[in-house]
Image: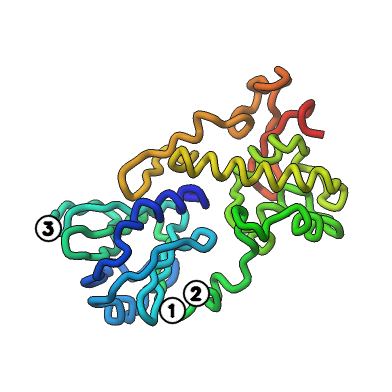
Amino acid sequence: MPELPEVETTVRAINKFENRILKEVIIHNKNLRWKVEKKVETLTRNQLVHKITRRAKYILIYFDKQCLMVHLGMSGKLRIQKSNNNYFKKHDHAEFIFKDEKIIFNDVRRFGSIHLCENPDKHRLIKDLGVEPLSKSFSKSYMKDICKNSNLCIKKLIMDQKNVVGVGNIYASESLFLAKINPSRLSKEVSDNECEKLVKSIKIILKKAIKMGGTTIKDFYSADGNEGYFSLKLNVYGRDSMVCNKCNTKIIKSIIGQRATYSCTKCQL
């Protein structure tokens, strides 16, 4: 599943379409996770794109009065090609056509979605989301507040999108390793000092992933065609039975919240 760094990488790849006219949106398959409304095609025609940004894993394309929300779901990806290029791939469900180039939305499993709204912050899919992990709001004091009375294990807490967005399974395991915190620890038992370390670790891991162009999923490509290579730098995720890079103890695999979790029993207490 494309996670926050992959989505951020994709946004950066399509930022060049800011201040261009979106001539039209063509929906080839309306039956995505939620059926694409007709207004996505009618109200976006010949609209000037003011800004392209991200909230959590939603790509936001702002016009004068509307905002197009695109979610990549489990397998979605965007690619850019020339407007007069008729190359078509199976599962190409939507085209966003500009004068010289177009953005194509491809989604094999069709768990992605496309919406049009006036204010994405009030949209039902976004309004209850937690803080952005790379923002100033995600701080030691914020982490302390959400941890202090929680009986959730720390890995589940940081993966809860109502607490903080975009810390997917791989990034959670890697961040907890960097912070030297066992993923199964109860959140309310995490110390103030550890809260600070965890916040810093999450920011470091996500920034590194973004810098390297994405992560993890073997078939992930950003919209400009660059493949993510962050998986080459992983310390624990997917490395069960291999030795820890820090202490040579074997990495163990456990299941937390039905998700595979990887950790070092010696480095992470």
In whole angstroms, how far apart are the C-alphas of marks 3 and 2? Answer: 32 Å
**Residue 85 found in image quarter:** bottom left
Which residue is depicted at the point 50% across and 59% down? 57
Which residue is depicted at the point 61% across and 28% down? 239
Asked if residue 170 can be seen in this view, the reply is: no
**Residue 39 found in image quarter:** bottom left
Q: Residues within 10 Å of mark 3 (few under 14, many from 20)?
A: few
Q: Secondary structure at mark 3?
A: loop
Amino acid type, label 1: Cys
The answer to whether 89 appears left or right of 3 in the picture is: left
In whole angstroms, how far apart are the C-alphas of marks 3 and 1? Answer: 29 Å
Amino acid type, label 3: Asn
Which residue bears the numbered disc 2?
120
Which residue bears the numbered disc 1?
117
Q: Secondary structure at mark 1?
A: strand
Q: Earlier in the sequence, mark 3 or mark 2?
A: 3
Which residue is depicted at the point 27% across and 59% down? 103
**Residue 107 found in image quarter:** bottom left
Q: Earlier in the sequence, mark 3 or mark 1?
A: 3
In whole angstroms, how far apart are the C-alphas of marks 1 and 2? Answer: 6 Å
